[in-house]
Amino acid sequence: MLNPEERNRARKKAMRLLEHMDRTEKGLTDKLRQAEFSPEAVEDAIAYVKSYGYINDARYARTYISFRIESRSRQKILTELQMKGVDRQTALEAWEEMEELLAPDERAVLRKTIEKKYQPDTELDEGQMRRLYGYLGRRAFKYEDISRTLEEMNIRVKHDI
């Protein structure tokens, strides 16, 4: 049986956590568990804030995407959302919604990311090129897009003769 005092403290804590920033259900659950509330109190607090619409993973995903769509790849954003506890289907639906609304150009994002490191018409040694591909790959850009964009920007490996 859930202690009414603990229930109220957990609910208040959940509300305070949501005052400062939007959270996923998983994120809020983790924070409440860290505050050492019983599983029952955590479950009750989550149900309480959900009943008022204060927590909504689909809304969270749309907001998250809208703030990052111009600076990160689609795959990177979807991975980050899954790490935050948003299920893949919800994240994909939010992506499709925001993509239709904002019409991002992933190649332009890739180009901006490359330009932070190198200007067009740059010659790199093999090690620098490998590191650049690794850097961009870790940001979940596709190999074909990276190759095509580097070619368009005339960033190439210098060959010693």
Image: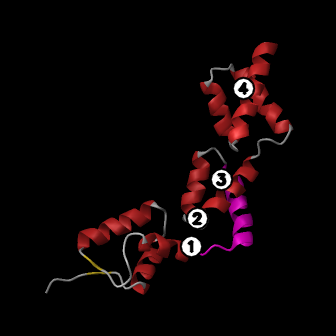
Q: Give neighbour class at mark 1: few <14, some 14-19, many 20+ (Cα, 10 Å).
A: some
Q: Is residue 51 above or below residue 11?
A: below
Q: Is there CB contact under 8 Å for labels 4 and 1?
A: no
Q: Is residue 16 above or below residue 61?
A: above
Q: Quadrant of residue 128?
A: bottom left
Q: Nearer the viewer, residue 107 or 86?
A: 107
Q: Is there CB contact under 8 Å for labels 1 and 3?
A: no
Question: What amino acid does circle 2 point to?
Answer: Arg
- The residue segment tinted magenta is 87-105
Dot 2 or dot 4: first in sequence order is 4
Q: Which residue is mark 4?
A: 42
For label 1, the SS is helix
Q: What is the spatial separation of the Cα atoms under label 4 and label 1, in whole angstroms?
A: 39 Å
Q: Which residue is mark 2?
A: 74
* In this view, the mark in front (3 or 2): 2
Residue 1 shows in this picture: no
Q: Give neighbour class at mark 3: few <14, some 14-19, many 20+ (Cα, 10 Å).
A: few
For label 4, the SS is helix
